Image (tube, grey):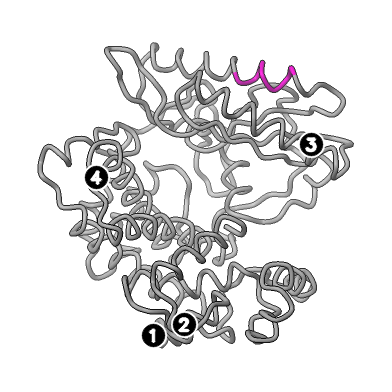
């Protein structure tokens, strides 16, 4: 299943010469009832936010992600439509100090839980300072937000101050970070398998949701490595099938990618249970795809083939996180806070690397060798003892990932 082409009467073009997403839709192909359901959710969420945050501190509530760019997914429950993907937002605030923002984040965390019970999916808020918009990082999340978003409440032109961020110029390390985050979901799957959990029912749905997120990220990396990245799924599918991004195994991947797209837009993941799908076999297939894609992409980014996963884990091989000299003091402070003075001394070669560099270095080793004791390279990256059990190493990884993803 691939999303159908959009129609949009606007003549405006993005820097990548593609039409922006339609401003009057939340989903790719939902009918009026689906669109109305998502619109009601937006009104409910906007009301909750504006009750606790008012002008001049409140500038806007910006819906991002699939629903923000008219590509949200939906499911049907007893004949009624419901959202499937999370609702992701930036709340643009003005004139708030660090302590005020911290207090607001705590309040929003509580409100998020309340809203989840009402709308049926996670509601995620992040704060964006109005004062920082003009100097916003050239990042994947910011570039996608600029291309496709929906201002649910507040100033509809709130993001106009942000600099242009064409997709062709994205720092490639942004896709390395995306691969880290989606590969971490595969690690969560692997932990369930190693623990001998029964993967059925809702657990099976989550398991396959994580698999397909990883598959879609591999498609993104293939596009970005060829300077063809775009956030719209129709455009991604068309470009991935094109001869200008061809690679060995492309045809097999496209079949898998179609399944991953169907799972995003029209999820019916229970069918895998009905068909007797083997979670371990699917996991092995997806891990190998992720490893092959990461090896290729990092070779493109670094300008040379990576040696092997042990060599790739070396701190001398930068992963592009905390990319400039100005970031070095912050990286040192993060490592000191996270690993302590003794940990810094024991793993001194990592002291000036961003902790995400350590995570990106460690993840291929964890996924390629499930159940194996931590090698010296893996232990060095995670700041643990060599020979630590795989379960302990993976737990350490996920603890760090939740802090620095």
Mark 2 or mark 3, earlier in chain: 3
Mark number displayed over residue 259: 4
Helix, strand or loop at mark 4: helix
Is residue 225 within the magenta segment?
Answer: no
The magenta segment:
45-51
- The correct choice, above or below, for 202 with respect to 75 in the image is below
Chief SS of the magenta region = helix
Looking at the image, the residue that sits furthest to the left is: 275
Q: Secondary structure at mark 3?
A: helix
Mark 1 vs mark 3, foreground winner is 3
Q: Nearer the viewer, residue 112 or 69?
A: 112
Q: CA distance from mark 1 to mark 4?
A: 30 Å
The residue under label 2 is 312
First in sequence: mark 2 vs mark 4: 4
Residue depth check, mark 3 versus mark 4: number of the one nearer the observer: 3
Q: Residue sitting at 60 percent across and 72 percent down?
A: 320
- Residue pictured at 20% horizontal, 51% vertical: 255
Q: Residues within 10 Å of mark 2 (few under 14, many from 20)?
A: many
Quadrant showing the N terminus: top left
Other residues around mark 3 within 10 Å, as few (<14) / some (14–19) / many (≥20): few
Which residue is identified by label 1? 308
Q: Mark 1 or 4, which is nearer the eye? A: 1
* Quadrant of the image containing the C terminus: bottom right
- SS class, disc 1: loop
Position of residue 29 in the picture relative to residue 122 (left or right) = left
Mark on residue 103?
Answer: 3
Q: Position of residue 199 (x, y in %)?
A: 24, 47
Pinpoint residue 294: horizontal percent, then vertical percent: 40, 70
Asked if marks 3 and 4 touch (Cβ < 8 Å), the reply is no
Left or right: 20 as drawn, with respect to 190 = right
């Amino acid at each position: 299943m691939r999303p159908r082409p959009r129609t949009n009467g606007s003549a405006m073009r993005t820097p990548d010469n593609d039409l922006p997403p339609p401003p009057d839709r939340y989903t790719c192909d939902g009918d009026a009832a689906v669109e109305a359901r998502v619109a009601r959710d937006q009104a409910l969420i906007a009301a909750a936010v504006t009750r606790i945050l008012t002008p001049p501190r409140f500038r806007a509530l910006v819906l991002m992600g699939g629903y923000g760019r008219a590509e949200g997914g939906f499911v049907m429950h007893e004949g009624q439509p419901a959202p499937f993907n999370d609702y992701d937002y930036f709340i643009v605030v003005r004139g708030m100090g660090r302590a005020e923002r911290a207090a607001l984040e705590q309040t929003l965390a509580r409100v998020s839980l309340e809203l989840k019970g009402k709308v049926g999916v996670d509601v995620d808020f992040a704060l964006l300072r109005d004062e920082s918009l003009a100097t916003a990082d050239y990042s994947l999340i910011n570039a996608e937000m600029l291309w496709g978003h929906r201002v649910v409440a507040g100033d509809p032109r709130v993001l106009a101050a942000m600099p242009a961020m064409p997709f062709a110029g994205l720092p490639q390390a942004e896709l390395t970070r995306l691969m880290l985050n989606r590969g971490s979901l595969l690690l969560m799957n692997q932990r369930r398998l190693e623990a001998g959990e029964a993967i059925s029912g809702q657990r099976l749905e989550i398991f396959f949701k994580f698999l397909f997120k990883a598959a879609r990220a591999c498609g993104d990396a293939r596009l970005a490595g060829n300077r063809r990245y775009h956030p719209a799924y129709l455009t991604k599918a068309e470009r991935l099938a094109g001869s200008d991004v061809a690679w060995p195994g492309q045809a097999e991947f496209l079949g898998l990618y179609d399944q991953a797209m169907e799972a995003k837009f029209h999820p019916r993941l229970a069918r895998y249970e009905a068909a007797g799908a083997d979670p371990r076999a699917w996991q092995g297939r997806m891990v190998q795809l992720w490893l092959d894609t990461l090896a290729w992409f990092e070779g493109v980014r670094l300008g040379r083939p990576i040696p092997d996963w042990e060599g790739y884990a070396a701190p001398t091989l930068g992963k592009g996180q905390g990319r400039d000299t100005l970031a070095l003091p912050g990286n040192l402070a993060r490592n000191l806070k996270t690993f302590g003075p003794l940990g810094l001394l024991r793993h001194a070669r990592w002291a000036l690397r961003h902790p995400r560099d350590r995570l990106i270095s460690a993840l291929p080793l964890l996924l390629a060798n499930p159940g194996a004791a931590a090698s010296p390279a893996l232990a060095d990256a995670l700041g643990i003892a060599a020979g630590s059990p795989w379960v302990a190493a993976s737990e350490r990884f996920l603890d760090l990932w939740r802090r620095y993803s």
